[in-house]
């Protein structure tokens, strides 16, 4: 969510340019607000957890394969996998997609909790 707030404050012009450079429509960059601001807020309050989680999974897959593609097979300066943090977000969201929001989530009655 903090990455998304940073993009709200500083803008996403660089992201639009990066997507255009990769042959993707720049308008896709605005999806980052949904994947990095709205979906994490929904996860925090436990509302429509699985829908929010799958949005984050899609967001992280796009981020990994566009912005971090060169780092997939490399190690970071501290000795860890270079995309360790994006993968943690991706796999954590994937776990929430399969497990749901739990007993104390705001929405627990339907299959898309």
Image (spheres, rainbow, N blue to C red):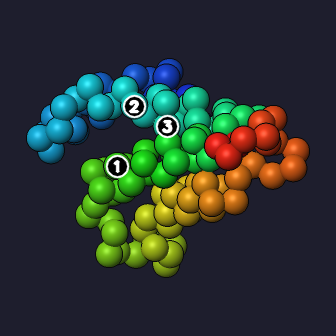
Mark 2 vs mark 3, CA separation in Å: 6 Å
Helix, strand or loop under label 1: helix
Residue drawn at point x = 49 percent, y = 30 percent: 34
Q: According to the image, label 1 marks what residue?
A: 62
Counting residues from the start of the chain, the first of labels 1 and 2 encountered is: 2
- Report the side of 17 relative to 5 (left or right): left
Helix, strand or loop under label 3: helix
Residue 92 occupies quadrant: bottom right
Counting residues from the start of the chain, the first of labels 3 and 1 encountered is: 3
Q: According to the image, label 3 marks what residue?
A: 35
Q: Are marks 1 and 2 in contact (CB under 8 Å)?
A: yes
Mark 1 vs mark 2, CA separation in Å: 10 Å
- Report the side of 54 relative to 95 (left or right): left
The quarter in which the N terminus is drawn is top right
Question: Residue 66, image x and y in percent?
Answer: 27, 51
The quarter in which the C terminus is drawn is top right
Residue at the extreme right? 104
Q: According to the image, label 2 marks what residue?
A: 31
Question: Residue 79, image x and y in percent?
Answer: 49, 78
Residue 5 occupies quadrant: top right
């Amino acid at each position: 969510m903090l990455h998304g707030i940073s993009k709200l404050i500083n803008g996403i012009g660089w992201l639009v340019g990066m997507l255009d450079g990769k042959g993707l429509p720049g308008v896709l960059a605005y999806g980052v607000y949904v994947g990095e601001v709205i979906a994490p807020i929904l996860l925090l309050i436990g509302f429509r957890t699985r829908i929010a989680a799958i949005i984050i999974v899609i967001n992280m897959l796009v981020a990994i394969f566009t912005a971090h593609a060169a780092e997939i097979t490399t190690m970071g300066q501290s000795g860890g996998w270079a995309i360790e943090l994006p993968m943690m977000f991706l796999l954590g969201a994937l776990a929430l997609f399969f497990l749901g929001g739990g007993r104390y989530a705001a929405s627990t009655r339907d299959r898309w909790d």
